[in-house]
Amino acid sequence: MSDITKQSLTELVINIKNKKLSSTEVTKAFIERSEKSKELNAYITEDFTSALEKAKRFDQKPNFDLKLSGIPMAVKDLFCTKDVKTTAGSKILNNFVPTYESTVTENIWKEGGILLGKLNCDEFAMGSSNETSFFGNVQNPIDKDLVPGGSSGGSASAVAGQLTPITIGTDTGGSIRQPASFTGTVGLKPTYGSCSRYGIVAFASSLDQAGPMAQNVKDCALLQEVISTYDPKDSTSIDFTRNQYSKELSNNIKGKKIGIPKEYRVDGMPKEIEDLWQKGVQYVKDCGAETIDISLPHTSYALPTYYIVAPAEASSNLARYDGVKYGFRSKGENLIDMYEKTRSEGFGAEVQRRIMIGTYVLSSGYYDAYYLKAQKVRKLIKNDFDEVYKKVDAILTPSTPSSAFKIGEKTNDPVSMYLNDIFTVPVNLAGLPGISIPAGHDSKGYPLGLQIIGKAFDEQNILNIAYAMEEKINFKNKINDWWIK
Amino acid sequence: MSIDLKIIKHISKLSRISVNEKKAEKLAGDLNSIFDFIEKLNELKTDNVEPLTSVAETTLKLRPDKVKSENIREQIVKNSPQDNEDYFVVPKVIE
């Protein structure tokens, strides 16, 4: 039984289809391991009893034509799941039980997936270390007291720790790719408009995208194939012909042109990251691709732009939490007092900080100087990408400027925390797809990731490049199960 | 540019988040360091740049104006912190 959780999604799907394993056996194995892994604090809500029932029902009447036949899976607690508590990592949604299902999770259940539970994340996905969650920080399976990254920290920890074969996260400024990089896993942020945002707790609507997180590229491609659908319920969902990403996966990237942007060589970047990047260049060359030096001149303006656009949208989106319609309510002397106390007690410090920034940049007299300015710079950042994509098929960069850091190391300095997302944020601003794959270890043995950025709707191409590189890199995650009780 | 306690009080009111003195001071400090970092955008001349409001290059689709969700009143009030039959309940607003 114990080796079931070590299998990849692709292996599990085959073994269930060939009746070598039942869905019940697989589900039981992941539940048992999850129960021994409480110290990771990866789960906010466990749905194990119901998962076992669903697995038994599947085994009684199996349908092996589905893409995820009988596969159990935990998901980030930002996806609304019908009749299962959905908190977004916040006190203000501590008691919220959705009466509807997000489109992305609905797609998973339709293909035979089974919900194991809801995974921890930074509050409203605002954070890069999973330390802003109302439900406590998450441990990285790589080492004790190490952050798993964020905001999809519980998701990354659960995949790396083999508590779930695969998962989904959301990525507004790097929230899938950065934790994937910190935990030695694979994370894909799809093109804006590829996966429906319906039923996902909103953070910054022009940036938010759901995406798969997995142990390897093939699993990631399979889950992307399942979750990416056109959805009329999301007005920004795009109606385009989606590839069969896992079936069309190919390691043949001969002749592909891959850009290496000089602006990503930032001041103070550790030599280990630079070395990893150079190795990445060698790997793609070994695969028969060609690398080209490129320039994305406005890269250093991406983070300041993001820290206007994202909080502005968040301050509008989070106006709905008023203690009236759902969620936590504090007692107030009158209506206004009730609103103010509810929001002051219900939101954590980071969320309040971002609402304040957003409110300020949208307020009368400051709108042009900040919000409009940021939207203009956002255009320049997107133009940079449009320009280089005339010459190259994809771009290769490090995923993060450092490996995972210790819990508490950056909590007192918001700006240093924000700098974590320096390589991932431009991709969201331009609405492009990006994937992080594990590519090596630093001197402490912590994983480091490389990011491949693609053209809009060119997920297949970056998955193929990642697949080819994965073969060359042959990465092995160093996990010793230190947390297992 | 500096964000003082007066501005913090103003945005606290706009965002309906109550702050006490201690919290206001902490927020002022944090916001000042964040805005120092944001000021970098002023290095760029953007007079002739069109603002980018959405990366999804699509026009909003029209659909027939038909009711799709019926009889969901119960679902809508299900999560309300305090409800009375079919209504949301708030503190008294009319004397």
Image (cartoon, grey):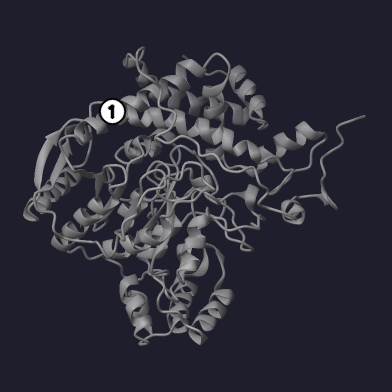
Q: Position of residue A205 (x, y in %)?
A: 49, 39
Q: Position of residue B28 (x, y in %)?
A: 54, 24
Extreme residue in the front direction = B64
Q: Which residue is mark 1?
A: A383
A429 left or right, relative to A54: left
Q: Residue at x 63, y 29 (%)?
A: B15
Can residue A65 be seen here? The reply is yes
Q: Residue at x 83, y 35 (%)?
A: A333
Q: Residue at x 25, y 32 (%)?
A: A386
Can residue A439 be seen here? The reply is no
* Nearer to the camera, B16 or A14: A14
Give me the chain letter of mark 1.
A
A42 up-or-down from B12: above or below: below
Check disc 1 and report its element: helix, strand or loop.
helix
Q: Position of residue B54 (x, y in %)?
A: 43, 32
* Nearer to the camera, A28 or A113: A113
A250 left or right, relative to A432: left
Q: Label 1 sits on what residue type?
A: Asn
A149 up-or-down from A348: above or below: below
A274 left or right, relative to A460: left
* Nearer to the camera, B70 or A156: B70
Q: Position of residue A31 (x, y in %)?
A: 48, 76
B85 left or right, relative to A418: right
How packed is label 1: few (under 14 Cα within 10 Å), some, or many (20 or more)? some
